Image (tube, rainbow, N blue to C red):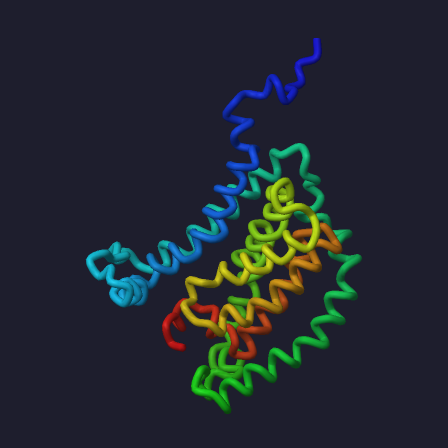
Amino acid sequence: MDTRLTSETTPKPARLFHSKAWLWIEWVGLYLLTPPLVAALSQPQLADALLDRIGLGAFSFDTGLPSGVFIFPVLLITFLTMLLYLRLDRSFDNARLWKIADLKAALPRILITFAITGPIVLFMSWYLAHHTPYLPESGFLRLPREIPILMLTITLLYPWVSAYPQEITHRAFFFHRYAPILGSGRTILILNIICFVWLHAPMWNPIALLMTLPAGIIFALTYLRTKSALAAGFEHAIYGIWAFASGLGYFVFTGSAGSI
């Protein structure tokens, strides 16, 4: 007897979970509302000041908890949940998560692109440090010059605790889960880039958003070309490490919140 579920026999909760209405609600909640909520909870003094300006000073986002409770735990829980979903979804090719052959195939293009854009990142850091008030002059190349142990720690941990998880949540899961409502063309690509930029709202500075716009374009295109989260994660990692080494990592570190 054929025991496979058809659209008529699929349980109602499952149909709801995959309905277009639910997908829209889920997408808005996860990718549009969660980043500003995390931003408000992690930096309540800035969020409360904003509430005061719009006449809602009676409300407060201050929970009394440290800011770190809201950023990395949220990213970790979201990453693990989305990874589990992809692993269990039979319609998703799990080779996209970590197939090393896809990374090897994409490696020459990734390195050539980085060879062109890497010096631009370095110049941006130098210019911001020496010609604007946004980055302290000592911030240019600060970590490798003054705190090499921290730079080494970032180099070892950043790919696995930040870069790769973001490519699961904002590339593999995003393009697979929301294709039914966003399609597979320009619309989903543009919205993916916007959502990646908006992910950095908890940094509370516009330079973090400006920095992650070209990065989001590069990583999204790599994922679409390779269909590999590992390839996009590797590319994300080398740019992130380079940003921290050059000094631009200051703008995507929560300690810079509200400094611009």
Where is residue 217, by image quadrant?
bottom right
Q: Is residue 64 visible?
A: no
**How far across and down, in percent of the image, does residue 97 sit?**
66, 47
**How far across and down, in percent of the image, does residue 61 sit?**
28, 57
Image position of 30 (left or right of 180): left
Extreme-bottom residue of the structure: 131
**How far across and down, in percent of the image, does residue 60 sit?**
24, 57
Instruction: Name the residue nearer the viewer: 79 or 213.
Output: 213
Where is residue 66, by image quadrant?
bottom left
Image position of 61 (left or right of 12): left
**In percent of the image, x 61 and y 38: which residue is there?**
87
Extreme-front residue of the structure: 55
Above or below, 246 against 96 in this view is below
**In percent of the image, x 54 and y 27: which residue is there?**
14
**How far across and down, in percent of the image, does residue 12 sit?**
52, 22
User: Which image quarter holds the N terminus?
Assistant: top right
Above or below, 156 against 79 in this view is below
User: Which image quarter holds the C terminus?
Assistant: bottom left
**In percent of the image, x 59 and y 55: which residue is there?**
191
**In percent of the image, x 49 and y 70: which residue is there?**
208
